[in-house]
Image (cartoon, grey):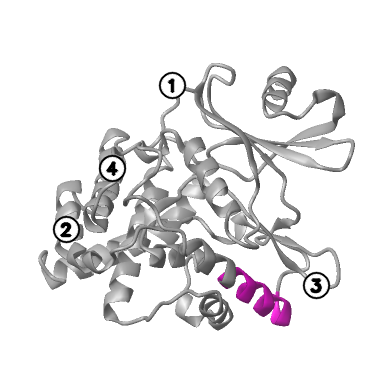
Protein backbone atom coordinates (compact mmCIF):
# COMPACT_ATOMS: atom_id res chain seq x y z
CA UNK A 1 0.00 0.00 0.00
CA UNK A 2 2.90 2.37 0.64
CA UNK A 3 3.93 2.14 -3.00
CA UNK A 4 0.41 3.01 -4.13
CA UNK A 5 0.20 5.92 -1.70
CA UNK A 6 3.52 7.22 -2.96
CA UNK A 7 2.35 7.03 -6.56
CA UNK A 8 -0.92 8.84 -5.83
CA UNK A 9 0.68 11.55 -3.69
CA UNK A 10 3.37 12.24 -6.25
CA UNK A 11 0.74 12.30 -9.01
CA UNK A 12 -0.90 15.09 -6.98
CA UNK A 13 2.36 17.06 -6.99
CA UNK A 14 3.54 16.25 -3.46
CA UNK A 15 7.13 14.91 -3.35
CA UNK A 16 7.34 11.67 -1.38
CA UNK A 17 10.76 12.55 0.00
CA UNK A 18 9.02 15.31 1.95
CA UNK A 19 6.59 12.88 3.63
CA UNK A 20 7.13 12.28 7.34
CA UNK A 21 4.48 9.62 8.02
CA UNK A 22 1.11 8.29 6.95
CA UNK A 23 -1.78 6.47 8.60
CA UNK A 24 -5.03 4.74 7.77
CA UNK A 25 -8.03 6.67 9.05
CA UNK A 26 -11.12 4.90 10.39
CA UNK A 27 -14.75 5.91 10.54
CA UNK A 28 -15.65 5.73 6.85
CA UNK A 29 -17.91 3.07 5.34
CA UNK A 30 -17.24 3.56 1.61
CA UNK A 31 -13.75 4.83 0.87
CA UNK A 32 -10.40 3.74 2.27
CA UNK A 33 -8.82 6.92 3.61
CA UNK A 34 -5.19 7.74 4.44
CA UNK A 35 -3.69 10.84 6.00
CA UNK A 36 -0.20 11.71 4.78
CA UNK A 37 1.81 14.16 6.86
CA UNK A 38 4.70 16.13 5.41
CA UNK A 39 7.82 17.23 7.24
CA UNK A 40 6.81 20.90 6.89
CA UNK A 41 3.64 20.23 8.94
CA UNK A 42 1.20 20.21 6.04
CA UNK A 43 -0.85 17.19 5.14
CA UNK A 44 -2.89 15.59 2.40
CA UNK A 45 -5.74 13.10 2.50
CA UNK A 46 -5.95 10.24 0.02
CA UNK A 47 -9.31 8.58 -0.58
CA UNK A 48 -9.58 5.31 -2.49
CA UNK A 49 -13.01 4.19 -3.64
CA UNK A 50 -13.88 0.48 -3.72
CA UNK A 51 -12.33 -1.44 -6.61
CA UNK A 52 -13.91 -1.70 -10.03
CA UNK A 53 -15.72 -4.93 -9.25
CA UNK A 54 -17.01 -3.89 -5.84
CA UNK A 55 -20.80 -3.69 -5.38
CA UNK A 56 -21.83 -0.04 -5.18
CA UNK A 57 -25.03 1.98 -5.53
CA UNK A 58 -25.79 3.58 -8.87
CA UNK A 59 -25.27 7.14 -7.69
CA UNK A 60 -21.84 6.18 -6.33
CA UNK A 61 -20.33 5.64 -9.76
CA UNK A 62 -17.69 8.27 -10.34
CA UNK A 63 -18.27 10.08 -7.06
CA UNK A 64 -14.58 11.01 -6.81
CA UNK A 65 -15.39 13.39 -9.64
CA UNK A 66 -18.39 14.68 -7.70
CA UNK A 67 -16.35 15.32 -4.56
CA UNK A 68 -13.51 17.05 -6.38
CA UNK A 69 -15.97 19.17 -8.33
CA UNK A 70 -17.71 20.23 -5.13
CA UNK A 71 -14.44 21.41 -3.60
CA UNK A 72 -13.49 23.28 -6.75
CA UNK A 73 -16.82 25.12 -6.71
CA UNK A 74 -16.70 25.79 -2.97
CA UNK A 75 -13.17 27.17 -3.28
CA UNK A 76 -14.72 30.10 -5.11
CA UNK A 77 -17.03 30.81 -2.17
CA UNK A 78 -15.64 33.45 0.13
CA UNK A 79 -14.54 31.99 3.44
CA UNK A 80 -16.07 28.50 3.08
CA UNK A 81 -13.52 26.02 4.51
CA UNK A 82 -13.10 23.01 2.23
CA UNK A 83 -10.11 20.95 1.11
CA UNK A 84 -8.39 21.75 -2.16
CA UNK A 85 -8.66 18.85 -4.60
CA UNK A 86 -5.10 18.26 -5.83
CA UNK A 87 -5.80 15.29 -8.07
CA UNK A 88 -8.76 13.03 -8.78
CA UNK A 89 -9.40 10.31 -11.30
CA UNK A 90 -12.33 8.05 -12.10
CA UNK A 91 -11.57 4.43 -13.02
CA UNK A 92 -7.87 5.16 -12.68
CA UNK A 93 -5.36 2.61 -13.92
CA UNK A 94 -2.98 3.90 -11.27
CA UNK A 95 -5.35 3.16 -8.37
CA UNK A 96 -7.45 0.38 -9.89
CA UNK A 97 -10.54 2.53 -9.39
CA UNK A 98 -11.51 6.04 -8.33
CA UNK A 99 -9.34 8.18 -6.09
CA UNK A 100 -8.95 11.74 -4.88
CA UNK A 101 -6.01 13.47 -3.19
CA UNK A 102 -6.83 16.66 -1.28
CA UNK A 103 -5.30 18.99 1.24
CA UNK A 104 -5.95 18.32 4.91
CA UNK A 105 -8.27 20.74 6.72
CA UNK A 106 -7.58 21.69 10.34
CA UNK A 107 -9.63 20.26 13.15
CA UNK A 108 -11.43 17.09 14.16
CA UNK A 109 -14.92 15.78 13.38
CA UNK A 110 -17.60 17.55 15.41
CA UNK A 111 -19.09 14.14 16.21
CA UNK A 112 -17.19 12.62 19.12
CA UNK A 113 -15.27 15.74 20.15
CA UNK A 114 -14.05 15.79 23.74
CA UNK A 115 -15.00 17.90 25.53
CA UNK A 116 -18.27 17.99 23.56
CA UNK A 117 -19.43 21.13 21.80
CA UNK A 118 -21.99 22.80 24.05
CA UNK A 119 -23.45 26.13 25.13
CA UNK A 120 -22.08 29.33 23.64
CA UNK A 121 -19.38 27.44 21.73
CA UNK A 122 -22.03 25.36 19.99
CA UNK A 123 -24.22 28.38 19.19
CA UNK A 124 -21.29 30.25 17.64
CA UNK A 125 -20.22 27.24 15.57
CA UNK A 126 -23.75 26.52 14.35
CA UNK A 127 -24.16 30.16 13.32
CA UNK A 128 -20.84 30.05 11.46
CA UNK A 129 -21.88 26.79 9.80
CA UNK A 130 -25.16 28.38 8.74
CA UNK A 131 -23.33 31.23 7.04
CA UNK A 132 -21.06 28.80 5.16
CA UNK A 133 -23.99 26.68 3.97
CA UNK A 134 -25.87 29.74 2.77
CA UNK A 135 -22.91 30.76 0.65
CA UNK A 136 -22.65 27.26 -0.82
CA UNK A 137 -26.34 27.37 -1.69
CA UNK A 138 -25.79 30.56 -3.69
CA UNK A 139 -23.83 28.54 -6.29
CA UNK A 140 -26.04 27.68 -9.26
CA UNK A 141 -25.55 24.68 -11.51
CA UNK A 142 -26.35 23.97 -15.17
CA UNK A 143 -29.16 21.53 -14.36
CA UNK A 144 -30.61 19.25 -11.69
CA UNK A 145 -29.15 15.94 -10.50
CA UNK A 146 -25.82 14.27 -9.83
CA UNK A 147 -22.94 16.04 -11.61
CA UNK A 148 -21.04 12.78 -12.10
CA UNK A 149 -23.56 11.67 -14.71
CA UNK A 150 -24.02 8.38 -12.84
CA UNK A 151 -27.78 8.55 -13.40
CA UNK A 152 -27.56 10.16 -16.81
CA UNK A 153 -27.54 13.78 -17.93
CA UNK A 154 -28.67 16.65 -15.73
CA UNK A 155 -32.39 17.39 -15.89
CA UNK A 156 -34.20 20.61 -16.59
CA UNK A 157 -36.64 20.10 -13.70
CA UNK A 158 -35.99 19.21 -10.09
CA UNK A 159 -39.03 16.94 -9.99
CA UNK A 160 -37.73 14.70 -12.77
CA UNK A 161 -34.19 14.64 -11.34
CA UNK A 162 -35.35 13.75 -7.84
CA UNK A 163 -37.69 10.99 -8.99
CA UNK A 164 -34.81 9.59 -11.02
CA UNK A 165 -32.63 9.62 -7.89
CA UNK A 166 -35.30 7.84 -5.87
CA UNK A 167 -35.83 5.35 -8.68
CA UNK A 168 -32.12 4.52 -8.72
CA UNK A 169 -32.17 3.81 -4.97
CA UNK A 170 -35.18 1.52 -5.40
CA UNK A 171 -33.46 -0.22 -8.33
CA UNK A 172 -30.44 -0.77 -6.08
CA UNK A 173 -32.70 -2.28 -3.42
CA UNK A 174 -33.96 -4.76 -5.97
CA UNK A 175 -30.47 -5.52 -7.29
CA UNK A 176 -29.09 -6.21 -3.79
CA UNK A 177 -32.27 -7.95 -2.59
CA UNK A 178 -32.87 -5.43 0.19
CA UNK A 179 -36.07 -5.75 2.21
CA UNK A 180 -38.16 -2.58 1.83
CA UNK A 181 -41.17 -1.46 3.88
CA UNK A 182 -43.40 -1.92 0.82
CA UNK A 183 -42.86 -3.14 -2.76
CA UNK A 184 -40.59 -0.84 -4.77
CA UNK A 185 -43.23 -0.21 -7.46
CA UNK A 186 -45.68 1.00 -4.84
CA UNK A 187 -43.07 3.23 -3.20
CA UNK A 188 -42.42 4.86 -6.59
CA UNK A 189 -46.11 5.71 -6.76
CA UNK A 190 -46.02 7.21 -3.29
CA UNK A 191 -43.10 9.47 -4.21
CA UNK A 192 -44.62 10.42 -7.56
CA UNK A 193 -47.88 11.31 -5.85
CA UNK A 194 -46.12 13.98 -3.80
CA UNK A 195 -43.55 15.17 -6.31
CA UNK A 196 -45.64 18.08 -7.54
CA UNK A 197 -44.41 20.05 -4.53
CA UNK A 198 -40.93 20.02 -6.08
CA UNK A 199 -41.97 22.14 -9.06
CA UNK A 200 -41.49 25.30 -6.98
CA UNK A 201 -37.72 24.62 -7.01
CA UNK A 202 -36.52 26.44 -10.13
CA UNK A 203 -32.80 26.98 -9.41
CA UNK A 204 -30.31 24.09 -9.13
CA UNK A 205 -28.28 24.98 -6.03
CA UNK A 206 -25.11 23.28 -4.85
CA UNK A 207 -26.16 20.75 -2.20
CA UNK A 208 -23.69 18.77 -0.07
CA UNK A 209 -26.34 16.34 1.30
CA UNK A 210 -24.08 14.77 3.93
CA UNK A 211 -23.36 17.56 6.39
CA UNK A 212 -23.88 15.58 9.56
CA UNK A 213 -21.53 16.22 12.49
CA UNK A 214 -19.05 13.59 11.32
CA UNK A 215 -18.30 15.58 8.17
CA UNK A 216 -17.88 18.95 9.88
CA UNK A 217 -14.41 19.59 11.29
CA UNK A 218 -13.99 21.82 14.33
CA UNK A 219 -10.69 23.61 14.87
CA UNK A 220 -10.23 24.51 18.52
CA UNK A 221 -6.85 26.14 18.16
CA UNK A 222 -6.61 29.80 19.05
CA UNK A 223 -8.94 31.95 21.12
CA UNK A 224 -12.17 30.35 19.92
CA UNK A 225 -13.39 27.32 18.02
CA UNK A 226 -14.20 27.63 14.34
CA UNK A 227 -15.41 25.42 11.54
CA UNK A 228 -12.19 24.00 10.09
CA UNK A 229 -13.60 22.12 7.14
CA UNK A 230 -16.67 20.74 5.38
CA UNK A 231 -15.61 17.36 4.00
CA UNK A 232 -16.85 14.11 2.40
CA UNK A 233 -18.87 15.68 -0.39
CA UNK A 234 -19.44 12.48 -2.39
CA UNK A 235 -23.23 12.77 -2.18
CA UNK A 236 -23.33 16.31 -3.57
CA UNK A 237 -25.83 17.21 -6.27
CA UNK A 238 -27.53 20.14 -7.96
CA UNK A 239 -30.94 20.57 -6.41
CA UNK A 240 -33.11 22.09 -3.72
CA UNK A 241 -31.05 23.74 -0.94
CA UNK A 242 -33.67 22.58 1.58
CA UNK A 243 -32.31 19.04 1.04
CA UNK A 244 -29.17 19.95 3.01
CA UNK A 245 -31.23 20.53 6.14
CA UNK A 246 -31.81 16.77 6.48
CA UNK A 247 -28.22 15.83 7.34
CA UNK A 248 -27.58 19.14 9.09
CA UNK A 249 -30.16 17.99 11.65
CA UNK A 250 -29.77 14.23 11.22
CA UNK A 251 -32.50 12.47 13.23
CA UNK A 252 -33.49 15.90 14.54
CA UNK A 253 -35.46 19.02 13.58
CA UNK A 254 -33.65 21.85 11.81
CA UNK A 255 -36.41 24.26 12.79
CA UNK A 256 -35.21 24.00 16.40
CA UNK A 257 -31.66 24.98 15.48
CA UNK A 258 -32.04 28.72 15.96
CA UNK A 259 -28.32 29.48 15.85
CA UNK A 260 -27.83 27.70 12.53
CA UNK A 261 -30.88 29.35 10.96
CA UNK A 262 -29.76 32.77 12.17
CA UNK A 263 -26.37 32.23 10.56
CA UNK A 264 -28.00 30.89 7.40
CA UNK A 265 -30.10 34.04 7.11
CA UNK A 266 -27.11 36.26 7.85
CA UNK A 267 -25.21 34.51 5.06
CA UNK A 268 -27.93 35.27 2.54
CA UNK A 269 -29.92 32.05 2.79
CA UNK A 270 -33.69 32.17 2.61
CA UNK A 271 -36.11 29.55 3.90
CA UNK A 272 -39.67 29.62 5.21
CA UNK A 273 -40.92 26.50 6.94
CA UNK A 274 -44.44 26.33 5.59
CA UNK A 275 -46.38 23.16 4.73
CA UNK A 276 -44.79 22.93 1.27
CA UNK A 277 -41.23 23.25 2.58
CA UNK A 278 -41.86 20.66 5.28
CA UNK A 279 -43.17 18.19 2.70
CA UNK A 280 -40.10 18.75 0.53
CA UNK A 281 -37.92 18.20 3.60
CA UNK A 282 -39.76 14.96 4.35
CA UNK A 283 -39.22 13.75 0.78
CA UNK A 284 -35.48 14.38 1.05
CA UNK A 285 -35.25 12.77 4.49
CA UNK A 286 -37.03 9.70 3.17
CA UNK A 287 -34.65 9.52 0.21
CA UNK A 288 -31.60 9.76 2.49
CA UNK A 289 -33.00 7.05 4.76
CA UNK A 290 -33.57 4.83 1.73
CA UNK A 291 -29.92 5.23 0.75
CA UNK A 292 -28.76 4.49 4.30
CA UNK A 293 -30.91 1.37 4.47
CA UNK A 294 -30.04 0.01 1.03
CA UNK A 295 -26.27 0.61 1.26
CA UNK A 296 -26.03 -1.61 4.34
CA UNK A 297 -26.20 -4.72 2.14
CA UNK A 298 -23.43 -4.03 -0.41
CA UNK A 299 -21.24 -2.53 2.32
CA UNK A 300 -21.82 -5.58 4.50
CA UNK A 301 -22.45 -3.72 7.73
CA UNK A 302 -22.21 -5.75 10.91
CA UNK A 303 -25.23 -6.85 12.90
CA UNK A 304 -24.88 -4.04 15.43
CA UNK A 305 -25.01 -1.39 12.71
CA UNK A 306 -28.00 -3.12 11.11
CA UNK A 307 -29.90 -3.10 14.40
CA UNK A 308 -29.18 0.62 14.75
CA UNK A 309 -30.35 1.26 11.18
CA UNK A 310 -33.56 -0.66 11.77
CA UNK A 311 -34.37 1.60 14.72
CA UNK A 312 -33.20 4.92 13.29
CA UNK A 313 -33.97 4.51 9.58
CA UNK A 314 -36.21 1.55 8.72
CA UNK A 315 -38.92 2.21 11.30
CA UNK A 316 -39.25 5.90 10.35
CA UNK A 317 -39.50 4.80 6.69
CA UNK A 318 -42.34 2.44 7.60
CA UNK A 319 -44.15 5.22 9.47
CA UNK A 320 -43.72 7.70 6.62
CA UNK A 321 -44.89 5.29 3.92
CA UNK A 322 -47.84 4.19 6.06
CA UNK A 323 -48.93 7.80 6.53
CA UNK A 324 -48.60 8.52 2.82
CA UNK A 325 -50.56 5.41 1.93
CA UNK A 326 -53.26 6.37 4.40
CA UNK A 327 -53.56 9.77 2.74
CA UNK A 328 -53.92 8.13 -0.68
CA UNK A 329 -51.32 7.55 -3.38
CA UNK A 330 -52.22 10.76 -5.14
CA UNK A 331 -52.20 12.87 -1.98
CA UNK A 332 -50.09 16.02 -2.17
Question: Which residue is labeled 4 in the image?
Answer: 168
Label located before the other in sequence (1 or 4): 1
Label located before the other in sequence (4 or 2): 4
| Residue 80 screen position, x and y as percent | 62, 60
Q: Residues within 10 Å of mark 4 (few under 14, many from 20)?
A: some
Numbered label attached to residue 181: none
- Which residue does the image show at 40% across and 77% down from the upper left? 271
- Sequence-wise, the earlier of marks 4 and 3 is 4
Q: Is residue 179 visible?
A: no
Number of the label disc, if any, that sits on residue 192: 2
Magenta highlight range: 118-130
Q: Nearer the viewer, mark 1 or mark 3?
A: 3
- Disc 1 from disc 2: Cα separation: 33 Å
Q: Which residue carries the number 1 mark? A: 53
Residue 150 seen: yes
Mark 1–mark 4 CB contact (< 8 Å) = no
Q: Label 3 belongs to which residue?
A: 224
* 10 Å crowding of disc 1: few (<14), some (14-19), many (20+): few
Q: Quadrant of the C terminus?
A: bottom left
Main SS, magenta residues: helix
Q: Residues within 10 Å of mark 3 (few under 14, many from 20)?
A: few
Residue 291: percent from the left, percent from the top?
Answer: 38, 49
Left or right: 54 in relation to 212: left
Whole-angstrom CA distance, mark 4 to mark 2, is: 14 Å
Element type where label 3 sits in the image: loop
- Helix, strand, or loop for circle 2? helix
As measured in the structure, the alpha-carbon distance from the residue carrying label 1 to the one carrying label 3 is 46 Å
C-alpha distance separating marks 1 and 4: 19 Å
Amino acid sequence: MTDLLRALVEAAGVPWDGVADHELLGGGTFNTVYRVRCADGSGVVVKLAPGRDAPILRYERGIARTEAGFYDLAAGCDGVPVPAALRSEVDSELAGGDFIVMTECPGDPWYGLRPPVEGTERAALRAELGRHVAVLHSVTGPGFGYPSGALGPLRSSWRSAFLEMVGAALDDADRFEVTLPRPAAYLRELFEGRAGVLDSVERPALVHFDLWDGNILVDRRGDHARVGGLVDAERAFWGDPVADFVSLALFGDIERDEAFLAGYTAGGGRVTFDAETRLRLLLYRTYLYLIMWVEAVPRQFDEGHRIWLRQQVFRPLVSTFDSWAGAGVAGR
